[in-house]
Amino acid sequence: MIYSARMIEVIYAALGIMVLLSIAAFFLAESGKINNFPTYVVGILFILLMLLDRSAVRHFDAHLVLGITGLLTYFSLSALWADNGGLAAMLLYFGYSVLILSFVYSVLLLQMHYQEFLRFLVWFTVLAAVVSASYSVHLHYAFPEYQPLLEDRLVALGRLHNPVISALSYGMAIVMALHLLICGTNNNDRFFSGFCIVVLLVGVTLTYTRSVWIGVSVTTLYAIALYFPGSTWRRVAAAVLFLSVVVAIMLASFGWDELVKRSTSFRPEIWGELINRTLKTNWLLGHGIIADSSVAHSSYEHGTFSFHHAHSMYVATLFYGGVIGLSGFLGFLVYLGLLLHQADGDEKRGLATMALIYAVVVMFFDGDRFLAKVDYFWIVFWLPVAITLIVDREKRV
């Protein structure tokens, strides 16, 4: 019995280290093998913990477990009816599902075991993003040849191998830093949080990704409504001032012509093509999780372009999973929102709500598969889900 208790403590400690390493590797490690290794270890340790500590399941809500596993199972099974799918592809995506479940529920269990783990995790994520952004900006200016794109857009370290992926990941770190700024316990915390936000905003600006500005702006407006002291008119004035600053920064960064020219980046054409393709063929079940969602678009002004994914999580989910898959995904988001609405108004609820709002907004403009091995969507979506699970669990204690 003593041996088991000590073993469980060792597993918890190792699990915490590996969750943090998986986030650090995502932002900083160039090698895919290095990036993936900590997540595989998280999966193994989580399974061991479930076998040795049967009491851990008391932290799980049955409805949420069924919701998450049901959603992941459906999309894993969808590999069976994809044109280039089959049993091997289905098993691969079941493996990805296990990794996602292990990551999400490991964060929950670690917070229940170490009461300050979530705060440490948030600070760690912000700092990893700041290190990535700082060094990436340095490379951007000091070694322009490092940038793999012909455009002058920032491509960051680690798995942030695309300007949009860089911006989306930094955007979530900005949201976390904003929460730390608002809820900081002392002036040093607030000052350093503000510094982190500035560094990350520089990184986002250099990616020329407007959707992240929209996501961060909507999230900040929510934070102003929730936390800004004083009357409603003061909150409105603060919101107007904030939006004015954002518009000024975007105009200074992009210029009016560039802002208008690339305002949609052919997204309506991409979305229309994929929606039509789905509705005309397999509208109920979709094309399957591994289907090819590439779209070729031609225009007189720009020539022919090939887009490799939907540039919208919602359109992609409809394409891969049909009406059933999209309904399940939207229902899951609504359920998470209801859980947060019913929870007590503490700091964790504010953090979870801000992170989820950011995810919901940016998913309109970017995203492909929410079911995949470790990538930016673990930071943008599954980490907010894990924080929401923590809020729900503490509400039920």
Image (cartoon, rainbow, N blue to C red):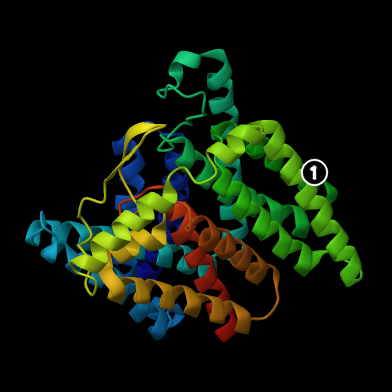
Instruction: Please give the name of the residue rendered at 68% of the width and 39% of the height, measured from the top-left corner.
Output: 250
**Which quadrant: the C terminus?**
bottom right
| 91 sits left or right of 103 in the view | left
| 239 sits left or right of 172 in the view | right
**Which quadrant: the N terminus?**
bottom left
Relative vertical location of residue 325 with respect to residue 150 in this rendering, above or below: below
Can residue 371 be seen by looking at this rendering? no
- Where does the image place residue 325, in percent across and percent down from the top left? 30, 72
Q: Residue furthest front?
A: 300
Give, as a three-letter code, the residue at label 1: Phe
Relative vertical location of residue 46 with respect to residue 127 in this rendering, above or below: below
- Where does the image place residue 131, in percent across and percent down from the top left? 58, 33
Relative vertical location of residue 311 with respect to residue 235 in this rendering, above or below: above
Instruction: Please give the name of the residue rendered at 60% of the width and 38% of the height, measured from the top-left corner.
Output: 259
Relative vertical location of residue 137 with respect to residue 141 in this rendering, above or below: below
Q: What is the total number of numbered labels drawn onto the structure image?
A: 1
| 246 sits left or right of 385 in the view | right
| 134 sits left or right of 359 in the view | right
Res 65 quadrant in image:
bottom left
Q: Residue furthest left?
A: 87
User: Label 1 belongs to which residue?
Assistant: 191
| Residue nearer the viewer, 396 or 248 | 248
